[in-house]
Image (cartoon, rainbow, N blue to C red):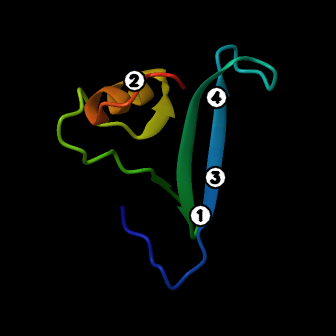
Amino acid sequence: MTIDTTKKVQVVTQFITTDGTANGDLKEIRRVFVQDGKVHEHPKTAQPGLKEQYDSIHDDMCSDMKTLFGDTNDY
């Protein structure tokens, strides 16, 4: 991802639901960055010890992070 920090960047946060509607149950939060009309995906995590590397927030990511850091899985 190459972002020019001297230029404006639009941050787009997407709240994705199970049924694709505005009233459905939340299943994922995804963020992208837009600069000069080009969409830049959020980079994946670089945290060693995770089952996989994540680029959005969802149940599996939260559970994996809680396990890795020894936190109670109570989100």
Q: Position of residue 75 (x, y in %)?
A: 54, 26
Q: Residues within 10 Å of mark 4 (few under 14, many from 20)?
A: some
- Quadrant in the picture for the N terminus: bottom left
Q: CA distance from mark 1 to mark 2?
A: 34 Å
Residue linked to disc 3: 12
Q: Is residue 60 left or right of residue 36?
A: left
Tag 3: residue type?
A: Val
Outermost residue, left direction? 48
Residue at point 37% right, 68% down? Answer: 2
Instruction: Mark 1 or mark 3: name the one nearer the start of the chain.
Output: 3
The structure residue drawn at horizontal position 51% and vertical position 22%, both measured from the top left corner, is 74
Q: In this picture, is 15 found above or below 2? A: above
Q: Residue furthest right?
A: 23
**Label 2 element class:** helix
Q: Kindly report the distance in space between the C-alpha atoms of the residues bearing marks 3 and 4.
A: 12 Å
Q: Mark 1 — residue? A: 37
Q: Nearer the viewer, residue 60 or 2?
A: 60
Give the labeled residue for mark 4. 16
Q: Secondary structure beneath disc 3?
A: strand
Foreground disc of the pair 4, 1:
4
- Identity of the residue drawn at 44% across and 50% down: 42
Q: Do labels 4 and 1 touch, CB within 8 Å?
A: no
Comparing marks 1 and 2, which lies closer to the viewer?
Answer: 2
Identity of the amino acid at label 4? Ile
Q: Residues within 10 Å of mark 2 (few under 14, many from 20)?
A: some
Q: Which residue is labeled 2 in the image?
A: 63
